[in-house]
Image (cartoon, helix red, strand yellow):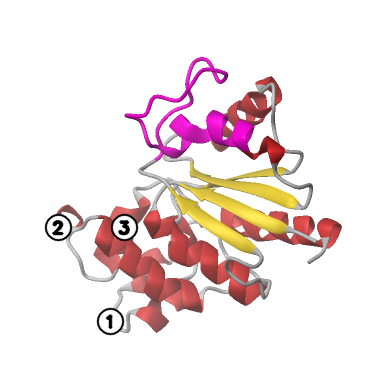
């Protein structure tokens, strides 16, 4: 038995994560998983054992307190933390998350840290077919020489490819892109390495814990 509590940076991540869990793994929301979006990335507090600053609502701001809070959950609960690397080195970021977990006085037994390189929009840029199916007039030929998960300003590049001006876009646009593109992502052979890492990580949890 398994139940996934998935923590993301924001609401625009939710459609993609939900698509992966429902389509790829046949999980049902509220029966097998819940997704908790936050108000941005934030930063890890200097003292992970201190009370969180209520003015800071980012994922990393709240992460130590939330992990400590999940310590009392039943053993079949697993916490999945999905965070963007932005311009940070993904290995360094992963090490900081693992270090944080090890420092906590109370923590859940099952935690999976996964990093989207550079942002979850990178998952879409790596799958030009998914973009074309969602946006018929998208100029996906501009992606032909770009390696998957390249750090290049992913959401801005996606905006340009589908014919939008980045300076005119906001979180609502990102949510729309995720809603439209995620249903077409190739989840059996993900083109983005970080998407593949997310999928295989969840797959491993389910294979070990079962449904």
Residue 139, by quadrant, is bottom left
In the rendered image, the residue lying farthest to the left is: 168
- Residue, disc 3: 157
SS at badge 3: helix
Mark 2 or mark 3: name the one nearer the start of the chain: 3
- For the residue pair 121 and 78, the one nearer the viewer reads as 78
Q: Is residue 126 visible?
A: no
Q: Gap between marks 2 and 3, in whole Å? A: 13 Å
- Residue, disc 1: 137
- Residue, disc 2: 168
In the image, residue 121 lies at what x, y percent? 41, 58
SS at badge 1: loop
Mark 1–mark 2 contact, CB under 8 Å? no
Which numbered mark, 1 or 2, is in the foreground of this view?
2
Marker disc for residue 78: none
Instruction: Give the magenta part as a residue range.
Output: 41-69
In the image, residue 117 lies at what x, y percent? 50, 47
Q: Gap between marks 3 and 1, in whole Å? A: 15 Å
Q: Main secondary structure of the magenta part?
A: loop
Mark 1 or mark 2: name the one nearer the start of the chain: 1
Q: Gap between marks 1 and 2, in whole Å? A: 19 Å
Q: Quadrant of the N terminus?
A: bottom right
């Amino acid at each position: 038995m398994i139940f996934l509590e998935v923590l993301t940076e924001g609401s625009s991540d939710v459609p993609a994560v939900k698509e992966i869990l429902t389509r790829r793994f046949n999980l049902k929301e509220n029966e097998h998983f819940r997704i908790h979006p936050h108000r941005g990335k934030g930063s890890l507090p200097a003292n992970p054992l201190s009370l969180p600053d209520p003015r800071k609502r980012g994922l990393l701001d709240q992460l130590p307190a939330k992990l400590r809070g999940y310590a009392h959950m039943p053993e079949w609960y697993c916490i999945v933390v999905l965070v963007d690397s932005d311009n940070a080195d993904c290995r360094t970021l992963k090490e900081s998350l693992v270090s944080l977990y090890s420092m906590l006085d109370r923590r859940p037994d099952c935690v999976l840290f996964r990093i989207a390189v550079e942002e979850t929009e990178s998952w879409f840029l790596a799958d030009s077919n998914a973009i074309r199916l969602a946006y018929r007039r998208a100029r996906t030929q501009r992606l032909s020489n770009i390696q998957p998960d390249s750090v290049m300003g992913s959401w801005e590049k996606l905006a340009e490819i589908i014919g939008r001006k980045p300076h005119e876009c906001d979180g609502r646009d990102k949510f729309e892109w995720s809603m439209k593109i995620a249903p077409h992502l190739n989840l059996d052979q993900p083109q983005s390495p970080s998407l593949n890492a997310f999928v295989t990580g969840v797959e491993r949890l389910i294979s070990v814990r079962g449904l």
